[in-house]
Amino acid sequence: MANDTHYDLVVVGAGNAALCAAISAREAGAKVLVLERGPEHKRGGNSYFTDGAIRFAYNELSDIRKLIPDLTDEEADKIVMPEYSTQDYYGDIMRVTSKKSTPELAGHLVNQSYQTISWMREQGVEFELNYSNQSFEKEGRYHFWGGLPVKTKNIGMGLMSTLFARAVELGINIWYDSRAVELRTTNGQISSVIVQQHSDKTNVETSGVVLACGSFEANKRMRSEHIGEEWEAAIVRGTEYNTGDGLTMALAMGAQKYGEWSGCHSIGTDYNAPKTGDFTKPGDIFKKHSYPLSIMLNKTGERFVDEGADFRNYTYAKYGREILKQPDHIAYQIYDQQVRPMLRKEYNLEEATYYQADTLEELVGQLDVNQEQFLTTIADYNNAVEDGYYNPTVKDGKATTGITPAKTNWALPIEQGPFYAFPVTCGITFSFGGIHVNTEGEVLNKENEPISGLFAAGEMVGGIFYGNYPGGSGLMSGAVFGKTAGTSAANYVQNKATNTTS
């Protein structure tokens, strides 16, 4: 084992949650080491791959302008920005998780969201309005919807570049190709971390550890064991390094398993997307999230979800698993020319896989599907579409009648060529299962007592998301609990040092 090294605090992981923890701890006076399992050119965890949309509570446009100070009065006059209060945010979490989210944890996320995003701005993180994905232009004004109007500038790359630069500026040490493999204690308190660096192991002495190294979504065995055998076929949308290391180490320390270990955040993604996140093509470029304007059919020619049940923000994290259940884990999003210009920008990228034809018969003839049933299902859907006013900026109630599943909003007949089919499969983002953490970021044991010196943040926090989640909440949760855990850990270390010397 290599020479021992000492730090006040070791942060395991180097994504958004981890660096927020490291920066907040350093601001509180701690000497901090960050461990990144991957090489430097693959740093940043899942956060590197995000499209940067981040959900927080705000009262009015003036709150947004504090985060985006270069937004001019002229631009602001063209914006319609509905309020998104803490009550709205909390209500959305509880609604989409069927009230399973732990109230204290959901409340902490919601109530600290604006304060935390303001703090991120102070660290140099830049934000911009999410025009392309969260607004519609109407009569010269941009109407925002869905409680998700802001994203980080230059998506996940920009976020992580800024946080790494800030960490270096503050004197935080970052070790790459460094995998934490074991936590050690003395007298029941964290005392060191064993770090694997290629063939060498180093014992890093420390009084505190923040685990923020993701969940187990990149571990095929753990996905199969905890979520289901079919999940071995899922594409891993982010980093290949989130294999459950932090969970394994925490559970070995007596941490309490918590949250929905059988659930995960998953989406419909391009059928030909890379099997793990491709660092040469960063950003969330393979997702296919205009499905509320489509109908989705499987290979047998059947629809299997209500595509228009709600805004994309509140259904996309659960519809991936529905696609995974379909034959050969594939489905087709079908659009016509009426809605094609409205599709999100990912549909226009060169990486997007699609089929196009002037007639539905020609389109379906290109697909490996039950062609007769496919065309019958589309015809039945078209006949079931009710009259009404079509408005993609609101839940317009323009629905179908007499078919199952219904489409309860944004139902238009698919009748104007050319026609398009986008093949999609399931991509897993992160697993919902984690460990029990309190609102101070402390890891709790099976008796709900803090494990001395052990903290956690990010995907490792169980108990917030069940079955689904409001879009943009993961990035915000990582920042909130990262900042909380870093500050708490620094205070713990300083109090321990004071008590030792007194």
Image (cartoon, helix red, strand yellow):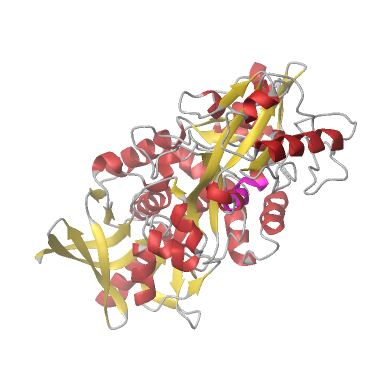
Whether residue 34 appears in this view of the structure is: yes
Position of the C terminus by quadrant: bottom left
**Residue 136 vs residue 237: left or right?**
right
Q: Is residue 385 magenta?
A: no
Q: Position of residue 408 (x, y in %)?
A: 81, 43
Q: Position of residue 12 (x, y in %)?
A: 32, 58
Return the residue nearer the eye: 115 or 454.
Answer: 454
User: Which region of the structure is painted magenta?
Assistant: 314-321
Q: What kind of secondary structure does the magenta stretch mostly adopt? A: helix
Dividing the picture into quarters, in which one does residue 362 lie? top right
Dividing the picture into quarters, in which one does residue 122 lie? top left
Whether residue 124 appears in this view of the structure is: no
Query: Residue, x 52% and y 40% (percent of image)?
Result: 269
131 over 297 or under it: above or below = above
Q: Position of residue 270 (x, y in %)?
A: 51, 37
Return the residue nearer the eye: 73 or 370.
Answer: 370
Query: Residue, x 71% and y 42% (percent of image)?
Result: 307
Query: Residue, x 75% and y 28% (percent of image)?
Result: 414
Numbered marks: total: 0
**Residue 245 vs residue 370: left or right?**
left
Query: Residue, x 50% and y 79% (percent of image)?
Result: 448
